[in-house]
Image (cartoon, rainbow, N blue to C red):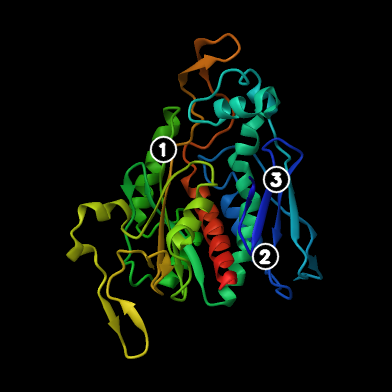
Amino acid sequence: MNTTGHKLRVTVFGQSHAQAIGCVVDGLPAGFRPDMDRLAAFMARRAPGRDPWSTKRKETDTPEILSGMVDGVLCGAPVSAVIYNSDQHSKDYEGLRHTPRPSHADYTAWVKYGESYDIRGGGQFSGRLTAPLCFAGALALQVLEQRGITVAGHIAAIAGIEDETPDFARVDRDALLALPEKPFPVFSHSAGEAMAQAIEAARMEADSVGGVIRCFALGLPAGVGEPMFDGVENRLAAALFGIPAVRGVSFGDGFAAAAMRGSQHNDPFITDGNTVRTRTNHAGGVLGGITTGMPLVVNVAIKPTASIGREQDTVDLKEMVNTTLTVHGRHDPCIVPRALPVVEAVTALTLLDMLMEE
């Protein structure tokens, strides 16, 4: 299904090389006036062509709003928007229908949809569809801001090179919000330079690298979420895995907690006489599926870009024989920088949806 959310429902439609992609967002509050300049700036962070190694595909990613807004104000009807595709090179995908690209959804799509599958640019499995997700998420981010909640992140690692890790219990909101102004959204300048060098080295070798995005939500009240199967972690993980290339989601210390002792991982409770908080935040702001009021910390693993310029083994599905292929076309050697705003967008949409249920 291409729809996520309960009270705030988002449906994404289109394919990478279709005439357009877009979304329908149902449940946004009437009377809210979004800042369209800020929305455009947020979407530009995901758009191709912002750095020397990103795909050369040129798309303006300018949404055309068809409904749900009157004179710049949300009217309560579903907000629908389209983003027209303008720079498709469909010829780059000729001959790939029966030779699935490793680590792409080509084979599974062929099994499920047969010859009808749109192979061009990955069809409905393409990262291109994260553009309308960013449109929807940009609206949610602004609504959350009105509630005093900030959702923002940084590149935690690329190719094994790690950024500085902030104190999860005391995340600096201003430092976090300043990151999009940097050429590389990291806290450590030297780490950012090393990451950029690793990306360029992979590009020169017709290869790719992955990384980790860390997203924070600051200002969330305690008590959001449900136990067992409808907790904050459950809902966020389900939505975040809808982003192409996501291979893992964890919270707080994540898998590192498995190597810790309870005395190291436990977060002691403290109070100032009015508010209960924890001295540390190894849990990442969630206990039992319910927010604690501490910063929410979500770690998202992004795989290396599947399309690489090296010869790879595959199968000719028509003849059922082993063969090889070399992927041509325009592809990022690392999608982590462009995936960061997508993670922020999906996190914002999911949290706003859960807050609307309270």
Q: Disc 3 marks which residue?
A: 13
Q: Amino acid at mark 1?
A: Val
Location of residue 196 by image quarter = top left
At label 1, counting other C-alpha atoms closer than 10 Å, the crowd grade (few under 14, some 14-19, many 20 or more) is: many
C-alpha gap between disc 2 and disc 3: 24 Å
Residue at image x 57%, y 54%?
Answer: 45
Q: Disc 1 marks which residue?
A: 209
Q: Position of residue 332 (x, y in %)?
A: 52, 37
Q: Position of residue 300 (x, y in %)?
A: 43, 51
Q: Amino acid at mark 3?
A: Phe
Residue 124 to residue 261: above or below: above
What numbered label is drawn on residue 227? none
Q: Disc 2 marks which residue?
A: 37
Residue 213 shown left or right of residue 94 in the figure: left
In this view, the residue in front, 85 or 179, is 85
Residue at image x 43%, y 60%?
Answer: 228
Task: Give the mark nearer the N terminus: 3 vs 1.
Answer: 3
